[in-house]
Image (cartoon, rainbow, N blue to C red):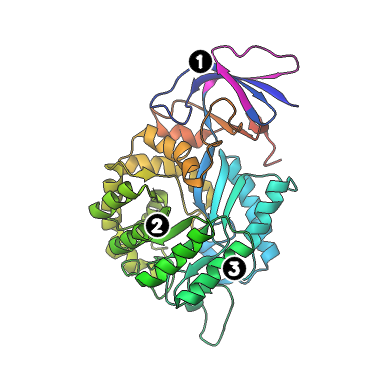
Amino acid sequence: MSMFVLICGKVFDGLSDALSGPAEILIEGNRIKRIERSAGRPPGAQVIDLSDRTVCPGFIDTHVHLTMDASNLALQTLQSSAAKALAGLSLAREYMSYGFTTLRDLGSVDPEFPTIDLRNALNSGLVEGPRLFVAAHIISASAGHGDLRGFYASRWNLPVSAIADDPGSIRALVRREHTFGSDWIKTTNTGGYFSPGDDPAQVTWFDDEMEALTSTARQLRMPVAVHTGAAEGCKQAIRCGARSLEHAYLIDAEGIEMAERAGAYIVPTMQMTQEDLHQMQAGTLPCQAVWKFRRDNESILASQRLLAGSRVKVAYGTDCGMFPFSHGILEFQAMVKAGLSPIRALKAGTSVAAELLGRSDLGVLATDKLADIVAMPGDPLTDIAATAKVDFVMKDGVIYRAPHYDALRN
């Protein structure tokens, strides 16, 4: 059994409101055995000096798309499932080098189940990369955000969307996701910005359709993540029992209060908004998104400020795949720019994200928790940009990156 002692300068344990340290962490196998001022030097333990770094739980991104490439989506959807899974593995390994030891993938655009295959390969140890939770497909109404037929001429009937328009068909899609191994159900109840032919300000499920989806998922004990934009869409998702609201672009004060009462999580993907703003200013935003984002961008930023000023449970998620994975680490900075405190942003990417996933063994540094640990130069509470400088990554007690060593890129 491998054994390590990490000598830590400062420590964020995932739960506290301040950094502690110096401290030492003793790791045996894939578990944390002790965190103390001095953890001793058991025979055979390898000592790692991180005394000039801040040590914290491995980061968790709860909204990625490993098999989607927004910059080339219409053509990329035509690739084979194997090609998408292999590209997703490469992205997952790259992303783990930035400190992300756990990901939730919220939908591929493929008739098969490439992200399920990727998750299983990671879980079995066949390949190395971050821990993965999966919603295999995006269940949508016709003309909803998950209906990508508008990318193609009407003569083509390509099986890349999971579309239903009545409660029975919706239930069948939820059951299909369960049958083939999805951990989560992902749906869209409003339009989106990058999809053609829909509008984020419009709700696309009727209440009985949304209830059919969530009640079926609940019966199968599957949590539901809802892509949502319009304030009324956010409220519909909360009323129907969604565990997480993705983006919540146009949520209002009433919706936030409802989410607080219901214990729902908001995954606001704030860096995605910054990416869209930059593209709009540069004139490179996809044409189908320009009019929608030009109309809504100020309202989105206002909703993000409302979230920052509330006590709702905010979890870290980026929507990477819609923009480069190399920018995903900037979500911490985007959260702070929107008004979240640095400590709340750090919790969003560690303990709150783990709670959203239902994994009490992740997202915190404590005895008997899984040894998912990252370290960075600097103090992220003083300068949140320190989170973009991670140079030590351990997942399940295995070191994948250390100063001057990066197994994920060698």
Q: If you read the primary sequence from the N terminus, does the residue marked by circle 3 or circle 2 appear first?
A: 3
Disc 1 element: loop
Against 198, residue 47 (above or below) is above
Residue with the mark numbered 1: 22
- Say left or right for 55 vs 208: right
Q: CA distance from mark 2 to mark 1?
A: 43 Å
Q: Which disc is residue 336 wearing?
A: none
Range of magenta residues:
32-53
Q: Position of residue 239 (x, y in %)?
A: 34, 59
Amino acid under disc 1: Pro
In magenta stretch: residue 275: no
Against 361, residue 72 (above or below) is below
Q: Residue furthest bottom?
A: 155
- Give residue 235's quadrant in the image: bottom left
Residue with the mark numbered 3: 176
Q: If you read the primary sequence from the N terminus, does the residue marked by circle 2 or circle 1 appear first?
A: 1
| Residue drawn at x 28%, y 43% as measured from the top left | 310
Residue with the mark numbered 2: 241
- Say left or right for 99 vs 282: right
Residue 44 makes an appearance in the image: yes
- Say left or right for 204 vs 402: left
